Amino acid sequence: MIYQTAQDWRDAPQKHVLLFGMSGLGKTYISNLMRDHGDWFHYSVDYRIGTRYMGEYIADNAKAEAMKVPFLRELLMTDSIYIGSNITFENLSPVSTYLGKPGDPAKGGILIDEYKRRQEQFQRAEIDALMDTSYFIRRAQALYGYPHFICDTGGSICEWVDIDNPNDPIMAELSKHALCIWIEGSDAHIDELCRRFDKAPKPMSYQAEFLDQSWNAYLAEKNVDADKVNPDDFIRWTYRKALDHRQPRYAAMAEKWGITVKAEDIYAVKTPADFENLVAKTLEDRR
């Protein structure tokens, strides 16, 4: 780790951290707080994915839908209108909409082969965006003069890390430049995330092996053909399984390459000083 002790952290003129963990446990909350009330640069991996690595896929998908409408087709073919996504830190919907949900197209789903293709695109994009972290650390200081840096990762980072390899290329690179911090949720937090997801199921990215196992198990349990799957039902059925799959992966990442803070302690942070003190205490307790 780049900060071995609480004193290393407190004395560092340039503090660099990377947050990881389940979506909904405070990564973006802390990142926004540090950006808005301190001299911290906020690097959003999901924003980078949507603007740099998947922007063309997203726009082309929207254009393909528009081309099905004769009126819009004519305007597009004559370059009379422009279609693009309006991604912001607060609105990353274009990325999740493109990822979609597998199942019956008549119910808003995507056929499984196309769904898997988009999953592979997202995996490559997320890895590339993660590996851009050191570039943005340098850019934040050289271009904008920010001494401190916080990287806000997506919940699926753990899917691409080889947790059994101490030299995993993703985590070896990230931990060389930033203190990696897992925000750990309790069982109660996980239950609440599941309740929220059940009300508004959203597209997710999955490790390929996990997706295959879950898809085949769902088809067998529900006795349904792949092209007749209810997309929302499938991702609801899969969500808790996905969280249970990810939890030990996050834990292994924190053990090998970083530190762990509790979600309830993150929620208690109200100022940059609170966050810096929480990190210092965690480093102190780790020794």
Image (spheres, rainbow, N blue to C red):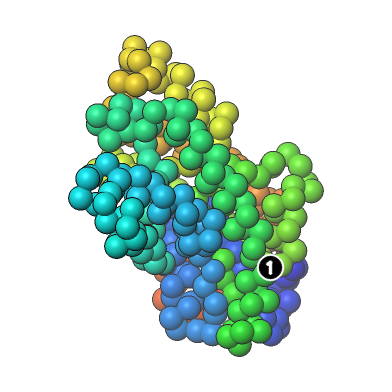
* Total tally of numbered discs in the picture: 1
Question: Which residue does the image show at 29% across and 62% down from the upper left?
Answer: 80
Front residue of 204/107: it is: 107
Q: Quadrant of residue 261?
A: bottom right
Residue 205 pos. (x, y %): 48, 42
Residue 39 pos. (x, y %): 54, 85
- The vertical placement of 139 against 75, above or below, is below
Q: Secondary structure at mark 1?
A: helix
Residue 128 pos. (x, y %): 63, 55
- The vertical placement of 282 against 224, above or below, is below
Residue type at mark 1 is Ser
Question: Which residue does the image show at 79% across and 48% down from the upper left?
Answer: 167
Residue 12 appears in the rendering: yes
Front residue of 227/229: it is: 227
What residue is disc 1 on? 134
- The vertical placement of 179 against 210, above or below, is below
Of the 4 image quadrants, the one containing the N terminus is: bottom right
Question: Which residue does the image show at 30% across and 45% down from the upper left?
Answer: 67
Report the residue that reaches farthest toward the right: 167
Residue 91 appears in the rendering: no
Question: Which residue does the image show at 34% across and 60% down from the upper left?
Answer: 79
Residue 93 pos. (x, y %): 35, 55
